[in-house]
Image: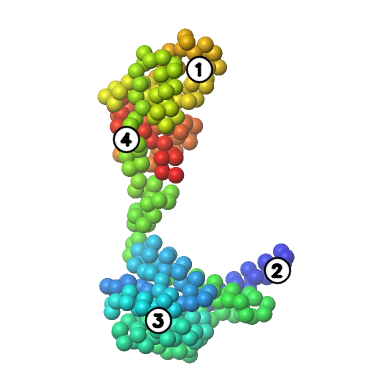
């Protein structure tokens, strides 16, 4: 089985190297025309090519090229209404003779859409109906029967990646641009999302330092944050977490004599709401805590509470 896996890798690497050798000035022209379009880049294909096309469209869209995938079958039954006259079509078909793809070419011609063909046959119908053609002719499929699309779909995928990266570089696409399209990812949190965007501000659990142990427990349960703050928003004296409670009970089993002042941590970590969420996460990991107070550490004023699971 290991030998089979290595053979597949070798065959697909060989095919990619072959396709890399086919890249010529046509590729640069394709990049230029996509850069200069005022419309979208619409990717289409069916079967395995369609699945690859969806990934290519997603990669393009997330890296600065306005793009979406159009299913040929759905297109033939009404979705062609999505296509504007300024849009460019990236048509993927290894044979260049796929029926479902060929059926929508007349519309693109009528609509005056520029077609970029991605095929393994420069003499195919798709290639002949394309303004530009990207040749992904492979040496051989990794499938021993030469039936299942393997090396050919890998070649199409890598050609799409090459387009996306070339367009990124041509646009000067940077990390902050990428983060705008990925606000939910780690990079988005690092470059875009701030603590104030994720902190909790409603019904914050504040308690008085003179309350009883039972009242402290009730306040913590009502807050549902696994902690309470001692003081108020204008001045925080300390914090009591569920961990503080457990440690206090181990030291003083008689809760009747326990005071809030004995239990609380008097120097809780306070972070500014303008800091990035990634910094908050880093601090929490380093300090092995699950809660950060948000506000002014200097004035000990509180505007919110930040916890990692606020947004999970």
* x then y, percent, for residue 222: 40, 28
Q: Which residue lies furthest to the top in this view?
A: 257
Label 4's element? loop
Which residue position holds label 1? 248
Q: Position of residue 213 (x, y in %)?
A: 44, 16
**Alpha-carbon neighbours of circle 4 within 10 Å: few (<14), some, or many (≥20)?**
few
Identify the residue shown where x is 55% and y is 17%: 250
- Which circle, 2 or 3, is nearer the viewer? 3
Which residue is denoted by mark 4 in the rendering?
A: 201
What's the CA distance linking mark 3 and mark 1? 70 Å
Q: How crowded is mark 1: few (under 14 residues within 10 Å), some or many (20 or more)?
A: some
- Kindly check if marks 3 and 4 are in contact, taking CB atoms under 8 A apart as contact: no
Residue 99, placed above or below residue 69: below
Dots 2 and 3: beta carbons under 8 Å?
no
Q: Distance between the residues labelled 2 and 3?
A: 40 Å
Q: Which residue is drawn at 61% across and 77% down?
A: 148
Question: Tag 3 or tag 2, which sits nearer the N-term?
Answer: 2
How far separated are the C-alphas under marks 2 and 1? 61 Å
Among the two numbered marks 1 and 4 on one chain, the one whose residue lies closer to the N terminus: 4
Q: Which of marks 3 and 1 is nearer the N terminus?
A: 3
The residue beneath circle 2 is 4
Q: Where is residue 37 in the image (x, y as percent from the top left)?
A: 29, 74
- Pair 3/1: label in front: 3
Q: Residue 76 carries which label?
A: 3
Q: Out of 120 and 260, give the one closest to the viewer.
A: 260
| Secondary structure at numbered mark 3 | helix
């Amino acid at each position: 089985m290991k030998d089979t896996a290595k053979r597949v890798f070798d065959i697909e690497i060989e095919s990619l190297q072959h396709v890399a050798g086919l890249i010529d000035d046509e590729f640069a022209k394709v990049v230029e025309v996509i850069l200069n379009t005022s419309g979208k880049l619409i990717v289409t294909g069916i079967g395995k090519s369609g699945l690859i096309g969806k990934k290519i469209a997603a990669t393009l869209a997330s890296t600065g090229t306005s793009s979406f995938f159009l299913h040929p079958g759905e297109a033939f039954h009404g979705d062609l209404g999505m296509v504007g006259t300024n849009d460019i079509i990236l048509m993927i078909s290894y044979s260049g003779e796929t029926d479902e793809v060929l059926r929508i070419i007349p519309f693109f011609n009528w609509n005056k859409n520029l077609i970029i063909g991605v095929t393994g046959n420069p003499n195919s119908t798709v290639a002949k109906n394309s303004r530009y053609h990207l040749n992904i002719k492979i040496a051989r499929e990794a499938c021993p029967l030469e039936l299942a699309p393997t090396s050919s779909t890998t070649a199409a995928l890598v050609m799409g990646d090459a387009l996306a990266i070339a367009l990124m570089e041509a646009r000067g696409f940077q990390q902050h641009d990428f983060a705008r399209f990925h606000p939910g990812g780690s990079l988005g949190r690092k470059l875009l999302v701030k603590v104030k965007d994720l902190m909790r501000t409603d019904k914050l659990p504040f308690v008085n330092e003179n309350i009883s142990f039972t009242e402290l427990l009730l306040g913590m349960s009502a807050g549902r944050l696994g902690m309470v703050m001692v003081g108020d928003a204008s001045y925080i004296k300390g914090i009591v977490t569920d961990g503080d409670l457990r440690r206090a009970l181990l030291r003083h089993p008689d809760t009747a004599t326990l005071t809030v002042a004995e239990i609380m941590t008097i120097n809780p970590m306070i972070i500014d709401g303008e800091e990035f969420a990634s910094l908050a996460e880093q601090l929490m990991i380093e300090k092995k805590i699950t809660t950060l107070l948000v506000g002014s550490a200097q004035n000990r004023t509180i505007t919110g509470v930040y916890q990692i699971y606020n947004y999970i």
